[in-house]
Amino acid sequence: MTANALSIASPVDSSVSLHQAREVAARLQRRLAGAVRGRDEVIELVIIALLADGHVLLEDYPGSGKTTLARALGEAIVDGQPAPGSRHSIAAFRRIQFTPDLLPSDITGATIYEVQNSRFVFRPGPIFAHIVLADEINRTSPKVQAAMLEAMAEKQVTVDDETHALDALFCVIATQNPLDVAGTYPLPIPQLDRFLFKISMQHIERGAELEVLQTYPQRGLEIAAALPTTDRDAVLRTREVVRHEVVVAPAIKEALVDLARRIRDDRRVLQGASTRSLLLLLPALQARALIHGRDYVAPEDLDTLAPHVFAHRVQCTPGTDVQALLREHTAAQIESLAKFSLRHR
Amino acid sequence: MRRSKAGESTTNPELRTNSWLVVALHALMYAVTAAVLVAPLANLAAVVAAAIGGSMGALLAHAALRRGVSPAPCIAGALVALWVSTVLRQGLLTTTWLAHRWGPEHAASVVDFCWFGLAAIAVVATLRLLTAIRRAFATLEAMLVAIAFAQALVQHRQGAIHRPYEIVDTLLAAGVDPTLFFLAAGACAAVIIALVLLREAQWWRTLLHLATIALLIVLTWAALLTAGVPAAPASTAGGLGLHGKSAAGKSANPSGKQHSGGSPKEELEFRDNYNEESKRFPVAVVLLHDDYSPPTGVYYFRQTVFSQFNGQRLVSATRSDVDDDIATSFPAVATSLEHAPRSGKWRLEVTTTVALMADHARPFALESLAKLQPAALPATGHFRRVYIAESNALRADYRELIGLGAGSPAWGVEQRRHYTQLPDDRRYPDLAQRIVRETLPERLRQDPVAQALALSAWLGHHGTYSLRSRHAQSPEPTGDFLFGDKVGYCVHFAHAMTYLLRSLGVPARVATGYAIEESARQGGSALLLSGQDSHAWAELYLQSVGWVAVDVVPETVVDSPPTPPDPELQRLLGKMVRGEPLNTPPMQQRVAALRGETMRWLRRAQRLLLALLLATWALLMMVKAWRRVAPRWVASTALPRVVYRLQLDRLGEVQQRRLAGESREAFASRLRATVPALQPITQWHLSAAFGGHQSPGPAELQLLSRQARRQMQQAFPWWKRIIGIIIPWSWCRSR
């Protein structure tokens, strides 16, 4: 069910803002779907992450449309005016190719001496953008990874004792190749914790792949360019709406906590999901509810998002299928929510 | 290599990781089972061997599986071993060298010991290994155990009021209905089995088991209430009376084959061991029509006589002109025995009814049978054959008989010679004459009755009564007994008496049948004869009186004396023979009352169960109906939930249910092709449950509900929906 299903605006305020927020999400979704074929699920997750103020780690093969996806997202959010309080104009989209010889200053920016004005000025690095594609993030040294991840967590960079705030919209789409791991620096679990989702992408279906080829002369981004855009402020407003207007019932919160506890109590689990992950999951659930045209979080949201949120945070004994484990515990939680919903109150 | 092979072939890892407790329990169970199974087939040594073999088989199978040996070759090996040992056993039992070395009895029991032990090992190990290959073979194990114990209990099935079996008698004495006890035992077993089955991993299997058990209970109950407690079938067990080689116990008697001759039908054997257990079974009930007290204090029921000396021993007469006072077959019509002694001064006419409870080769009756006629069988099912015997029983005391001559004047030389033949052994006349000389006064030394009494007294004084004797191996057991240790039982005494009498020229013979003391009547007219009353005694012929029993009463008795019959059982069986109602004995009254009570209780429980079932059904249907109509009455806040629940109920009736772990939205999405209206209903329901702001009007929900119903009607066949509506518990599974 998409946002169009319940589209009659009611005179209530929250209803108006919900409607508008849904429209923003729908526009982003349409643009991305226009640019990248057969990745509807990933597109939805990326938009959820954007609206939930989180970052995404894509595990994918080369040439599967990651860059296209990230660029399309960046281009879908137009920004005429720099945000108030920011001294720099913000790019919509930046791509950073992470290599072993990359330095932290290569991404954060550096202070240089400006000859004309005879003073040091800060030249912002590529991280100062709405959407940053951190390509092959595991190829660079831990030092750079740490700088990048600090920026992701704090939404600011510190260069020469001067702290520069990043844009409020700042959203990182990082990628790593799941197979080609020679000479890489795998991200440790605490750093993986900074990503809201880790999405393992599958090859797209035959029909979608064929569609990509059939639209060949015209690039996906060109198709998407014709579709309506949204602006930075609208996205930020949408975030607010998601946070405040979509109801998370106490039962859902209980289910979240219970789920995390169940996972931690499992004998196969060495390290369970953190409380921060639950806190990150809440807005994600709300965002998904919004995208699906609801003003409340439903069990289905939990069912869909829990594996993406927990899979990279849970450390299991060797030989354990993490996905199966999560499915098992999520199913139990879904059962209890289903029982709850039928109960008389 | 072996390990990996075992990993493949042993598909049941559970068996290999059994704890020692489970293994010990298995061993114990098989020990008991094998012992119970073998007990009726062999002697004590073989039973012990079977018990040891049973536990060994279980332990060996466990050890083999733990070592990772493949079960299939083991089974083949066990079966081959079983076959080889069987062949070997046959060989050992039919060849003679082992018997020569150890004696036949020991040889037989050693071979039995080995064979039963080996067979138990092979069979038990095979069963255990089969179970290791496939779990389902555990059924075979369970069946073996069940059969072993069922066959031990099945003898009780007739209510066994006339059989002194341990459980039933104890229960009856305590005033408990045995039927109730066995029903309770069965119920306990069922409960235990049910508990075992409830350990299933999958809940639906448990449910299946429970349903099966419930079905069985209902079927048994229905059968019991319509047909009643199963009635006793006509008993076919026999071998308790004196018929042919009747009293042959479980172990083959080696001495039996040494004597050949005499009638092939009946033989009186000397044996060293009597199986006393089997002798406790009742064999017949005799009703005295007249109040008759025998002058000796003992009723002699004569069945067969042995008078012909064949050079070695006494056998049934082959001549037709002797022993003609014996009935050789059961009467089809009333028959009189022409040569029976007349009633009169010496004898009294006594009529008896004899009801046989075990098969007999020929009728027996109070001594000197005169007339025999068949009688109707009582309807109780406890008797095989009933006949009425008229006997001319001795009324005269021995003292009155003194002075009468021995033998009949009607006899020819051949007949007299027939009755006075004895082994060509000087010791008999020597001993007889010595006894007569030493104990009798001069004037009585030629009197046959006085001679007989003197001999009887001497034998009684010097002989020792024991069922365990050592004369059977001797070529002339009587001489061995009389001139040896003088330890023997009635057959020895009767033969010794006969030979001694014959050596004095008195015609004598050995009679067999039953002898029971008058006191056993205990004031009633019924006499219950059991195997332990079977007896052999000597008889001498007195002119104009006929054959008179002269029994020996040994003063030294090693074995325990026969127990008198249970008076209540005796009276009860007497009533049965007479066809009188049985309700007078207090025990029977109690049993009948208890049985009535039991049946009433069962009937009450059945009614209660039926009422409970009906109430449950009604309750379930009421709930179902309420859930059907609830959307019309509930408050609008509860409406989304109730409407959604209604859809779940309807879908459940056509077997469409949410899977475990499937979210409500996913369920609705799964059914969106067949029931599209379910999706908005689900949405509204979840919105109401999880705090959504928007809520639909009641009218809209009712409309959606009607749409969903129409869609379901189109999607699912009518009969499926009807079945769903009929089943009262369908809503219980809505989830």
Image (cartoon, coloured by chain):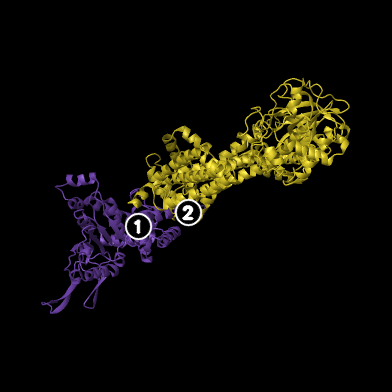
Chain colours: A purple, B yellow
Most foreground residue, A244 or B383: B383
Residue B621 seen anywhere in this rendered image of the structure: no
State which chain disc 1 sits on: A
Asked if badge 2 and badge 1 are on a common chain, one would say yes
Where is residue B383 drawn, in percent x and y? 71, 31
Crowd tier of the residue under label 1, counting other residues whose Cα lies within 10 Å: few below 14, some 14–19, many 20 or above: few
Image location of residue B518, percent across then percent down: 82, 37
Q: Nearer the viewer, mark 2 or mark 1?
A: 1
Mark 2: few/some/many CA within 10 Å (<14, 14-19, 20+): some
Q: Secondary structure at mark 1?
A: loop
The answer to which of B199 and B566 lies nearer the viewer is B566
Q: Which mark is residue A320?
A: 1
Q: Give the vertical position of A259 relative to B385 (above or below).
A: below
**Residue tagged 2:** A340
Q: Is residue A313 visible?
A: yes
Q: Give the residue type at disc 2.
A: Phe
Label 2 sits on a secondary structure element that is helix
Residue B98: mark: none
At label 1, the amino acid type is Thr
